[in-house]
Image: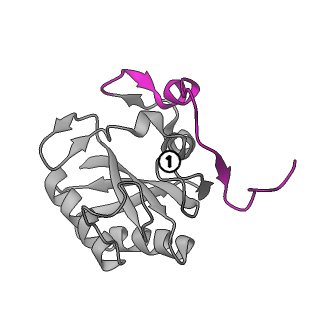
Amino acid sequence: MTVAYIGVGSNIGDRIGYVQQAHCLLNDTDGIQVLESSSLYETEPVGYKEQEWFINAVLKTETILSPEDFLNQCFRIEKQLGRVRHPELPKNGPRTIDLDILFYDNKIINTEIMEIPHPRMHQRAYTLVPLLELDEDMIHPVFNKTISELHENLEEPEEVYLYGTRGIDF
Protein backbone atom coordinates (compact mmCIF):
# COMPACT_ATOMS: atom_id res chain seq x y z
CA MET A 1 0.00 0.00 0.00
CA THR A 2 1.14 3.49 -0.88
CA VAL A 3 0.14 6.71 0.85
CA ALA A 4 -0.61 9.47 -1.65
CA TYR A 5 -1.71 13.03 -1.06
CA ILE A 6 -4.02 14.76 -3.53
CA GLY A 7 -4.64 18.48 -3.80
CA VAL A 8 -8.27 19.20 -4.67
CA GLY A 9 -9.55 22.53 -5.96
CA SER A 10 -12.62 24.06 -7.59
CA ASN A 11 -13.70 27.58 -8.56
CA ILE A 12 -16.68 27.10 -10.89
CA GLY A 13 -20.27 26.49 -9.82
CA ASP A 14 -20.85 24.54 -6.61
CA ARG A 15 -17.22 24.63 -5.51
CA ILE A 16 -17.79 22.77 -2.25
CA GLY A 17 -20.03 20.23 -3.99
CA TYR A 18 -17.34 19.46 -6.58
CA VAL A 19 -14.70 18.97 -3.89
CA GLN A 20 -17.05 16.70 -1.92
CA GLN A 21 -17.96 14.71 -5.05
CA ALA A 22 -14.27 14.25 -5.92
CA HIS A 23 -13.66 12.97 -2.39
CA CYS A 24 -16.50 10.45 -2.71
CA LEU A 25 -15.52 9.35 -6.23
CA LEU A 26 -11.91 8.79 -5.18
CA ASN A 27 -13.02 6.77 -2.17
CA ASP A 28 -15.37 4.72 -4.39
CA THR A 29 -12.56 3.88 -6.84
CA ASP A 30 -11.18 0.34 -6.60
CA GLY A 31 -7.67 0.48 -5.19
CA ILE A 32 -8.04 3.90 -3.52
CA GLN A 33 -9.17 4.67 0.02
CA VAL A 34 -9.39 8.20 1.41
CA LEU A 35 -7.90 8.09 4.89
CA GLU A 36 -8.19 11.72 5.91
CA SER A 37 -9.25 15.09 4.57
CA SER A 38 -8.08 18.56 5.49
CA SER A 39 -10.55 21.33 6.18
CA LEU A 40 -11.85 23.35 3.25
CA TYR A 41 -10.02 26.58 2.44
CA GLU A 42 -11.02 29.54 0.29
CA THR A 43 -7.98 30.62 -1.66
CA GLU A 44 -6.87 33.42 -3.91
CA PRO A 45 -6.21 32.36 -7.52
CA VAL A 46 -2.57 32.17 -8.61
CA GLY A 47 -1.39 33.28 -12.04
CA TYR A 48 -4.64 34.01 -13.85
CA LYS A 49 -6.17 36.42 -11.29
CA GLU A 50 -9.38 37.38 -13.17
CA GLN A 51 -11.44 34.49 -11.84
CA GLU A 52 -13.37 33.36 -8.78
CA TRP A 53 -11.55 32.27 -5.64
CA PHE A 54 -10.99 28.53 -5.17
CA ILE A 55 -12.12 26.04 -2.60
CA ASN A 56 -9.11 23.84 -1.82
CA ALA A 57 -8.41 20.82 0.36
CA VAL A 58 -5.89 18.00 0.56
CA LEU A 59 -6.82 14.34 0.80
CA LYS A 60 -4.59 11.69 2.32
CA THR A 61 -5.21 8.42 0.50
CA GLU A 62 -3.95 4.88 0.48
CA THR A 63 -3.67 3.07 -2.83
CA ILE A 64 -2.51 -0.12 -4.46
CA LEU A 65 -2.50 1.58 -7.88
CA SER A 66 0.67 2.46 -9.74
CA PRO A 67 1.38 6.21 -10.05
CA GLU A 68 0.19 6.13 -13.69
CA ASP A 69 -3.04 4.31 -12.86
CA PHE A 70 -3.61 6.64 -9.90
CA LEU A 71 -3.18 9.66 -12.19
CA ASN A 72 -5.55 8.14 -14.76
CA GLN A 73 -8.20 7.71 -12.07
CA CYS A 74 -7.76 11.38 -11.11
CA PHE A 75 -8.19 12.38 -14.79
CA ARG A 76 -11.29 10.16 -15.04
CA ILE A 77 -12.87 11.84 -12.03
CA GLU A 78 -11.99 15.31 -13.30
CA LYS A 79 -13.65 14.51 -16.63
CA GLN A 80 -16.68 12.99 -14.87
CA LEU A 81 -17.07 16.25 -12.92
CA GLY A 82 -16.90 18.41 -16.05
CA ARG A 83 -13.23 19.44 -16.10
CA VAL A 84 -12.23 20.65 -19.56
CA ARG A 85 -8.55 20.59 -20.53
CA HIS A 86 -7.72 22.50 -23.69
CA PRO A 87 -4.45 24.13 -24.80
CA GLU A 88 -6.24 27.41 -25.61
CA LEU A 89 -7.63 27.80 -22.07
CA PRO A 90 -5.56 29.77 -19.51
CA LYS A 91 -3.11 27.47 -17.71
CA ASN A 92 -4.36 28.39 -14.25
CA GLY A 93 -7.86 29.25 -15.42
CA PRO A 94 -11.26 28.38 -13.96
CA ARG A 95 -12.18 24.74 -13.45
CA THR A 96 -14.91 22.63 -11.94
CA ILE A 97 -12.33 20.38 -10.30
CA ASP A 98 -8.58 19.95 -10.20
CA LEU A 99 -6.94 16.85 -8.72
CA ASP A 100 -3.17 17.06 -8.32
CA ILE A 101 -1.04 14.25 -6.96
CA LEU A 102 1.18 16.05 -4.46
CA PHE A 103 3.03 13.06 -3.01
CA TYR A 104 3.13 9.36 -3.80
CA ASP A 105 4.88 8.02 -0.69
CA ASN A 106 8.32 9.62 -0.79
CA LYS A 107 8.91 8.72 -4.43
CA ILE A 108 10.36 11.17 -6.95
CA ILE A 109 8.81 10.61 -10.38
CA ASN A 110 9.53 12.70 -13.45
CA THR A 111 8.06 11.46 -16.73
CA GLU A 112 6.36 13.05 -19.74
CA ILE A 113 2.95 12.66 -18.10
CA MET A 114 3.67 13.34 -14.42
CA GLU A 115 5.98 14.99 -11.96
CA ILE A 116 5.76 13.89 -8.33
CA PRO A 117 6.12 15.55 -5.89
CA HIS A 118 4.02 18.22 -7.56
CA PRO A 119 6.56 20.67 -9.03
CA ARG A 120 5.05 23.89 -7.64
CA MET A 121 3.44 22.77 -4.40
CA HIS A 122 6.31 24.20 -2.33
CA GLN A 123 5.37 27.66 -3.71
CA ARG A 124 1.63 27.41 -3.03
CA ALA A 125 0.06 28.31 0.30
CA TYR A 126 -3.23 26.79 -0.94
CA THR A 127 -1.48 23.42 -0.92
CA LEU A 128 0.84 23.80 2.05
CA VAL A 129 -1.78 25.12 4.51
CA PRO A 130 -4.06 22.04 4.16
CA LEU A 131 -0.98 19.78 4.23
CA LEU A 132 0.08 21.41 7.52
CA GLU A 133 -3.20 20.21 8.96
CA LEU A 134 -2.60 16.61 7.87
CA ASP A 135 1.16 16.18 8.46
CA GLU A 136 3.28 19.25 9.15
CA ASP A 137 6.37 17.10 9.80
CA MET A 138 6.23 15.19 6.50
CA ILE A 139 9.51 15.60 4.59
CA HIS A 140 9.45 16.78 0.98
CA PRO A 141 11.73 14.24 -0.76
CA VAL A 142 13.26 16.78 -3.17
CA PHE A 143 13.91 19.69 -0.80
CA ASN A 144 14.43 17.58 2.34
CA LYS A 145 12.34 20.06 4.35
CA THR A 146 9.18 19.57 6.35
CA ILE A 147 5.85 20.93 5.15
CA SER A 148 6.07 23.39 8.05
CA GLU A 149 9.50 24.63 6.88
CA LEU A 150 8.30 24.98 3.29
CA HIS A 151 5.32 27.01 4.51
CA GLU A 152 7.54 29.26 6.62
CA ASN A 153 9.77 29.88 3.58
CA LEU A 154 6.98 31.10 1.27
CA GLU A 155 8.08 34.47 -0.11
CA GLU A 156 4.75 35.88 -1.30
CA PRO A 157 1.97 33.52 -0.22
CA GLU A 158 -1.46 33.95 -1.75
CA GLU A 159 -4.36 34.53 0.62
CA VAL A 160 -5.78 31.39 2.22
CA TYR A 161 -8.79 31.40 4.56
CA LEU A 162 -10.45 28.57 6.43
CA TYR A 163 -13.74 28.28 4.53
CA GLY A 164 -16.32 30.67 5.93
CA THR A 165 -13.82 33.09 7.48
CA ARG A 166 -12.89 35.24 4.47
CA GLY A 167 -13.95 38.81 5.09
CA ILE A 168 -14.44 38.31 8.84
CA ASP A 169 -12.41 40.55 11.13
CA PHE A 170 -11.18 38.74 14.21
Amino acid of disc 1: Val
Percent x, y of residue 56: 52, 57
Left or right, 155 with reference to 145: right
Q: Tell me the element at label 1.
A: loop
Q: Which residue is drawn at 23% across and 64% down?
A: 31
Percent x, y of residue 142: 30, 25
Percent x, y of residue 108: 22, 33
Image position of 26 with respect to 8: above or below? below
Q: How is the image coloured?
A: one colour
Camera-nearest residue between 154 and 69:
154
Question: What span is in magenta?
Answer: 141-170
Name which quarter of the figure residue 143 lies in.
top left
Q: Name the residue under label 1.
A: 46
Camera-nearest residue between 146 and 168:
168
Camera-nearest residue between 34 and 55:
55
Percent x, y of residue 10: 48, 65
Left or right, 49 with reference to 81: right
Q: Residue at x 36, y 77 (%)?
A: 81
